[in-house]
Structures are given as C-alpha cells and as structure tokens.
Image (tube, rainbow, N blue to C red):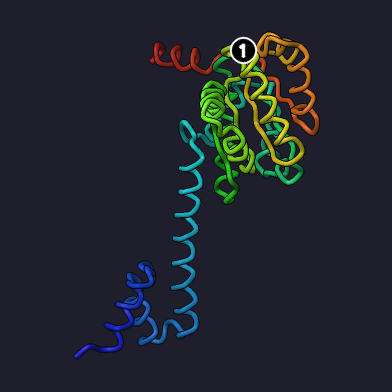
Amino acid sequence: MTTNYIRLTNNLEALKLYTIKENLPAYIDMINDGSKTTIDALYELTEKEMNLKEQRAIKACVHTAGFPCEKTIEDFDFNFQPSINKKEIEDFMSLRFMENNENIMFVGSSGTGKTHLATAIGIEAAKHRKSVYFISCQELMIQLKKAENENRLDQRLRSFTRHKLLIIDEIGYINMDKESANLFFQLISRRYEQKSTIITTNKSLAKWNEIFGDSVIANAILDRLLHHSHIVSIIGPSYRVKDVLDALDN
C-alpha cells in the first residue's frame, strides 16, 4: 500500500525539490520529538531548497560569462602593487559603477594584475545575477568580422550589447585594421551610457591612435569610453616575474 509519505517524496522528486526530499526524514523526526514546529520545519526546508537553487544559478552565471579563470579580490596582493587604491577597487566590487552605467579602464604593463582585477569584479557581478561576458579583444574582433562577413553583424552587436557588464581584455596587444576599428567603434557606441564596460590595456590612452591606426576613430572611441569612466593606472612590476622569482627562491 502506497502511503502519503511515499506520495510526498514522489511529488518532491517530480518537482525536482531534491534538497527538501533529502532532508525531509530528519525534519519529520524533529517535529515528532518536539524540537521543531511544523512551520519552522517547512520554512527551513524551503530555505535550504532556495539557497541551493540560488547557488546553482550563480554558478551558471559565472560559467556562462566565459572567464579564463576564477580570480577573487582576496587573491590580489595590493602590497605588491601599491600604486592601486584598494578602497577604489573595493568600491568597484560593490557594483555601484554598474548602477550608473559607468566604465572602468585598467591601464598598465603586462602582468601587473589588470585581468585579475577585471575578472574579480566580473565574477562579483555574476554572483549577483548580472549578465556578464568576458572576451579578449582579439577574439571579439574575430567574432565581429565573422558576423559581418555572414551578414549578421547587427545580431552579433546586439548580443554583445545586451550584457550588463562586458569585459574586453588585452586591448593594444595587436593593432587593428580600419575595418576592425570601425567595428569596435560600433560596439562601444551601442553600449555608451547604456551598459558598463571594463577595459584592460597595456597601452597608455595617449597611444590608442597606434592601436586603431587612426587618431579620429581612436578619439571617438575614447570619447565614449572615458565619459562616465574610472581610470586605474597600474605602475609596478609583473606578477608573473614575481611568481618565477618566488619559485626560484624556494
């Protein structure tokens, strides 16, 4: 004979409420011995289920953002890079800049922690269920050029524009041709004052005309990026060199 308890566990299984099902026997025991009221037991069971679903959603947001690795602000050695204002970075971690559709630009030599900081901020945004996407500048241009050649550029631009936070990594490592510069300008123009963008670059902003091969388009891009923007200049040694030296010392 099928009991209501069996029917209940079957229903929980069908509804995919696996956490409630797993914890149900223990809570029934607590109700029976008087250590939990029925209301408290039901509340705690549903709270466990909701917490698990929230953690799964956060994990999915982080995964779909495309981060190259998981970096946190706790992993960053501010003592090694004293030129960085830690309080300012902590303010970025509050995501206040996203509420105002502001941009962040990390400028510094290779290995100084630009990508680490950008990733840490992006992961924090993803954990708060914000739509985040991380992409290298080179890969971004490959995708935009491919879309243009396939007559679906508008669709691809709309896709990149819909993310609440777009992180474009490593601008300046490879110079762009005129076509790429125009495509990049279109993307930045669409996001201007609508969504937040984080940029990492190894080139000083005064040399961006070298990246885009045209001072007019470089200035047009910078004009939109710098308006409502925070610029973080990192002046210091490379973490990669530090890691190698630390390994040699050991």
Residue at the image point whose x is 76% and y is 43% from the top:
100
User: Split into 4 quadrants, where in the image is the C terminus?
Assistant: top left
Q: Residue 130 versus residue 89: which sits nearer the camera?
A: 130
Residue at the image point whose x is 59% and y is 50% from the top:
128
**Residue bearing the label numbered 1:** 177
Amino acid, disc 1? Asp
Residue at the image point whose x is 35% and y is 82% from the top:
28
User: Split into 4 quadrants, where in the image is the N terminus?
Assistant: bottom left
- The answer to whether 204 appears left or right of 140 in the picture is right
- The answer to whether 193 appears left or right of 22 in the picture is right
Percent across and percent down for residue 4 are 30, 88
Residue 73 in view in this figure: no
Percent across and percent down for residue 186 are 69, 28
Element under label 1? loop
Q: Tell me which corner region of the image, top left, top right, bottom left or bottom right, holds residue 111.
A: top right
- The answer to whether 19 appears left or right of 217 in the picture is left
Q: Residue 127 versus residue 174: which sits nearer the camera?
A: 174
